[in-house]
Image (cartoon, rainbow, N blue to C red):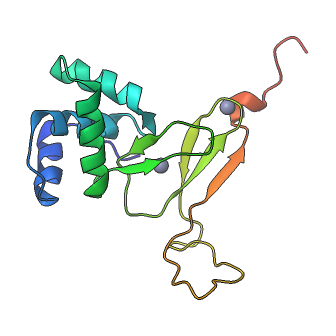
Amino acid sequence: MRVVQNPPQAERLLRDATLRVTAPRKAVLSAVHEHPHADTETLLAATRARLGSVSHQAVYDVLRALTDAGLVRRIQPAGSVARYEARVGDNHHHLVCRSCGAVSDVDCASGEAPCLAPSDDGGFEVDEAEIVYWGLCPACQSPPAGR
Ligand SMILES: [Zn+2]
Ligand SMILES: [Zn+2]
């Protein structure tokens, strides 16, 4: 697992993406690195832990800017709130637990996008297939104690 959390790294990523480096952007980007697949509330709390007071709207705006710049990937499994991760550009997929909502990464099955060829592409030039594997995580598979 890739963990990048020191502010200088966040600063470099922002500069490489030609984004202006601001304290909220550094803090939010670091929070996304530290909490893969976290929702906005979790990222807001982590950002506040670093910066002190910061508004909900500010964190939303930063997440949008980071997502637009390709530094952060936004995923939203059906029935879930939006979640964010810093692992970008590798076309990885997600395993999502139907019971507790746990999300974990799984590498791209074919190695590159689109991972799955449509049975009929309808003339589209397909560049991405978003794949979510639904099921029960190991913790949710275990029978309740006492059986
Ligand atoms: Zn589960
Ligand atoms: Zn992921």
Q: Position of residue 145 (x, y in %)?
A: 82, 14
Would residue 4 be found to the left or right of residue 98 on screen?
A: left
Q: Name the quadrant containing residue 58.
A: top left
**Residue at 32 percent of width and 21 percent of height:** 45
Would residue 12 be found to the left or right of residue 140 on screen?
A: left
Q: Which residue reaches farthest top?
A: 146
**Residue at 26 percent of width and 49 percent of height:** 66
Whether residue 146 is visible to the viewer of this picture, yes or no, is yes
Q: Name the quadrant containing residue 104.
A: top right
| Quarter of image, ligand 1 | top right
How many marks are shown on the rendered structure?
A: 0
Check the image and report above or below for 55 versus 81.
Answer: above
Check the image and report above or below for 98 versus 90.
Answer: above
Would residue 112 be found to the left or right of residue 31 on screen?
A: right
Whether residue 4 is visible to the viewer of this picture, yes or no, is no
Q: Position of residue 112 (x, y in %)?
A: 49, 73
Q: Quadrant of the C terminus?
A: top right
Q: Position of residue 73 (x, y in %)?
A: 39, 52
